[in-house]
Image (cartoon, grey):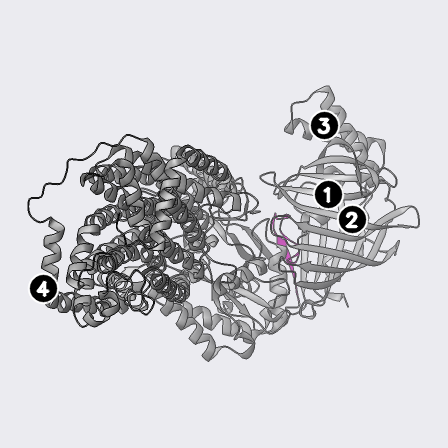
Amino acid sequence: MLTKQHNTTSRTAIAAGLLIGLLAGLAFEPASAQNSAAEEKGFQIAARSDRSDTGFESSEVNAVMTLTNSAGRTSTRELYFKTLERENEDVGDKSLTVFETPRDVQGTALLSHAKILEADDQWLYLPALKRVKRISSANKSGPFVGSEFAFEDFTSTELNKYGYNYIGEDTFDGMTVDVVERFPRYENSGYTRQVSVVDQDIFQVRKIDFYDRKNSLLKTLTLSDYREYEGGIWRAHLLTMENHQTGKSTSIAYSDYKFKTGLADNDFVKGVLRRIR
Amino acid sequence: MPKTMTAMDEFAVKLANTVIQHRWLVIIATLLVTFLVASGTQHLKFSNNYRDFFSEANPELRAFEDLQSTYTKNDNIFFTIVPPDGEVITNETLSLVEELTEQAWQIPYSIRVDSLTNFQHTEAEEDDLIVENLVNGADSLSTEQLARVKSIALSEPLLRNQIISSDSRATAVNVVVQYPEKSLDEVPEAVTFARNLRDEMKAKYPNHEIRMIGVSMLNNAFQEAAMADSMTLIPIMYVLLLVLMAVTVRTVSGTTVTVLMIGFASAIGMGVLGFSGTPMDPMVLSAPTIIMTLAIADSVHILITMRNSMKDGMTKRDAIVEAVRVNFLAVMVTSLTTAIGFLALNFSDAPPFWHLGNVSAIGIVMAWILSVTFLPAMMSWMPVRAPKPAKANGQSAMAKLADFVVGHHKKLFYGIGAIGVILVAAVPRIEFNDQWTEYFDESIEFRRDSDYSTQFFGFYPIEFSVQANGEGGVSDPEFLQKMDEFTEFLRAQPNVTHVYSLSDIMKRLNRNLHSDDNEWYRLPDERELSAQYLLLYELSLPYGLDLNDRVNIDKSATRVTATLTNTSTIATKVFLDAARGWIAENAPEYMQTTVPTSAQVMFTYVAERNVSSMITGNVIAIIAIALVMMVALKSARLGLLSIVPNGLPILAAFGAWALMVGTVGFSVAAVASVSLGIVVDDTVHFLSKFVRGIREKGYDAAGAIKYAFEMVGMALIVNTVVLVIGFAYLATSHFKINADLGLLTALAIGLALLFDFLFLPALMLMGADKLFTGKTLEGGTDNVDQTA
């Protein structure tokens, strides 16, 4: 998790996605020729963006998360992420998150098998208890370790989790960008919609506005410091989430990205949690 | 005209003549200035934030803002739901709660909703930790499931007595709102939405009582009370005072001009407020009333003298000039001293008092200027029916009163003096009580709803940001242990209905992670364990129900909330002192900086803060007034003496209040400033006529007293009656601060007349003979008493 996720680029997948996107669009607005065109374009931009960094197989990365409250005080946590790309587009990626600091949670590890529309499977290893606990919770919308990032903000970059709607062209940070609205299709989301800004040069998401359940602007995620890795894979190295309602913010800085590290399915099973470090 | 005109008299005569000569210029200029400044009123808006009652420098406010920027703002809307059958754990009531909870997320600016149904219940099942809503699909729960919900809810410390009453008769839905604070329309917007939601729910679930309290409702009530007052109280009061005035002054044109004066002076005062961009609070709305009373006082003096002069056979024009001449000094001194008194409100800690003081001061000065320009100009133009000449059949009532006072001055001195001393001695018995819900009378929905809800739930939260030892310190077993002891201590205090503490969550998680074994319902004994429990818990909470409002970002402090029932300010102070005492005695070094804070704490000390700063302000005002009197009366002794009749009625009014009512809100701080100027009016008019009697007419002390009674006695009575009724009418305000202020001021003004008529002359005749009838004054024809 926490990294861009992959999905297949096969035509059937896109067709299926389009169909689902259309159906999702129908739920929000009465269909018209114009609407379905906007939905299709929205989906295509999202799909192109998603497609641009597939094929990384697996990745490992260090992250420093900095939390800032409205009084300006900050606090940091360090984490290590491993992600396994899954070819099948109907299942999500697998990920392992290891907490390194603060020291009192060092070695705590979260294994997550992402799903598209249902709740993810999650297991947490608590070193102090020396036990693995499965977390049975439908909640993806809660904040991740006290940050402004919700769990779903990480795990929900999969294409088919949303319905889409193309809004138009704009400029952002000196770039010409496409603005695409997307609507969560999974249950228990904290959002009614998100507005993402995708550049037309390298097709990466630059900014996302999150609208809460009453459709008020809640947060803005800004993705910057994009770097290209082997195979044309782009990764943002700085993610900043600003909460407009509470004045709090969280940034995540990634470093030392590694790809194709040889991870396999058996590195993402419950049993490995105890053996970390 | 008398030969012995002072420089001031000459100026007044010149002014009056000029004004009458160029009356159209004066009238047009008045209209122009008024419309120009009054255009500022279009920028006026009603305030709806209780924080407006506290200055930025207020230490309680700053502590509270610190807490709110560390956790989250704690503005809220709190729904109390009471079903008719006395049991909330039923399919019907839980359905209501479930639906209301879902809908409450739609309330504008809401960021969190807590209820019985969305409570995140945690449960162990083998190696699974299940986190889910306590109630899902309320309408289809079986009897067994309902029983399970009830047993969990009533044994859960986070819910019992906060979200569900311990007798299961009432439940609550608490909505936390966070306003961007960019527009004054935000609070009414949220409240209107919430009220519609309540109405929908009541229609769908008839017989259920649904009441709304919370900080947002409080803030909204401030606005509603101010609006209600401005719609009913203020217009009715205007009519009342003008009828009174028309009856006493007996001139239609005089009353008409006074109405215009009041309107102009008030409009200018409020116009300046509008231009300054300050929102209107319920207190500043008393300013037009205060301006009106002083405008009436000014014109009554002038109109009565004018009428009396016409009665004595003067032409209208001469009578107007004479009225301005005789009253110019007194009206000026009254206005200036009253304005000084109001400006002294700037010493208060509460910004609404500043605004009240400044708007009133501007209006009062305007009323004064109008009374010596606009009023004579209009009166010279408008028709005035000459009254019948005075019949010379014996003595007037005022002369009789004067004879009585002179004849019994010893008895009066000791009698009234004794009453004064007794009343002043009672002042320390006054108790401050600032319970915000009781700022409003029962005609305001908020007051009724809070009275109702108090039967089931507390409403006065006290927050503690309990400090741990550095980053991550909240997981330290020693800290958790201390915090748990503190929690238990708080729970044992009287008036505490609920305590929200992280220690309860920790105990529950410890039990959950040991297969729900009750043996493990205790605090974890390792720091790592607690830290990892918290991490696990945080990972499983849904949108809006996180711990961010309970634990600060670096986990070096956690917020403990004690909720009090409807508790008096004194009892709250006892509680706060006990809490501080516990921390000082028991808390480890790093926890010592933990302080209680909340809106309730702010209101608890609001009276003290304002009263102490206001005492400083009033002392300065009294000294300034004495100085003005010295210059105006050209006598240092009389100026000094004026402090007695100026100060005594106000102190006596507090004493009388202490004996009759006992408690008062922080509005008491404004009473001295509001009444001081009006009280001074009596003294100034009486003493200035007394001095005129000696200097101009050559009377002795007794004769000068009689002269003063005859000259201003009637005007002072008329003024006092009008003003007492005016201020007493403020008692019908929906806002208790205004009501107390009105009644206390009425009391002070009434007592002031009593002291000025019965005590001041006696005082001057008693040992003060030498002081005031010494040879410099005895000279009579000396028009200036430089040596006094």
Labels 1 and 2 touching (C-beta < 8 A) = yes
Of tags 3 and 2, the one toward the viewer is 2
Residue B419 higher or lower than B288, as above or below = below
Looking at the rendering, in which quadrant would you find the C terminus of chain B? bottom left
| Secondary structure character of the magenta stretch overall | loop
Q: Which residue is mark 1?
A: A208
Labels 1 and 4 touching (C-beta < 8 A) = no
Q: Which residue is mark 3?
A: A22
Residue B184 higher or lower than B648, as above or below = above
**Labels 1 and 2 positioned on one and the same chain:** yes
Label 4 CA crowd tier, 10 Å (few <14, some 14–19, many 20+): few
Q: Which residue is at the far left?
A: B393
Q: Secondary structure at mark 2?
A: strand
- Residue B100 position in % (x across, y down): 46, 41
Residue stretch in magenta: A131-147
Residue B335 in magenta stretch: no
Of tags 1 and 3, the one toward the viewer is 1
Q: Quadrant of residue B785?
A: bottom left
Of residues B691 and B480, the one drawn nearer to the viewer in this rendering: B691
User: Which mark sits nearer the N-terminus, 1 or 3?
Assistant: 3
Labels 1 and 3 touching (C-beta < 8 A) = no
Chain ID of residue with mark 3: A
Chain ID of residue with mark 1: A
Q: Which residue is mark 2?
A: A223
Residue A45 higher or lower than B580, as above or below = above
Instruction: Please tell me which residue is depicted at 76% across the width and 65% down the height of the picture.
Output: A276
Residue A140 in magenta stretch: yes
- Residue B94 position in % (x across, y down): 43, 43
Kindly identify the amino acid type of the residue bearing the numbered disc 3. Leu
Kindly identify the amino acid type of the residue bearing the numbered disc 4. His
Kindly identify the amino acid type of the residue bearing the numbered disc 1. Ile
Q: Give how far apart the Cα atoms at labels 1 and 3 are.
A: 22 Å
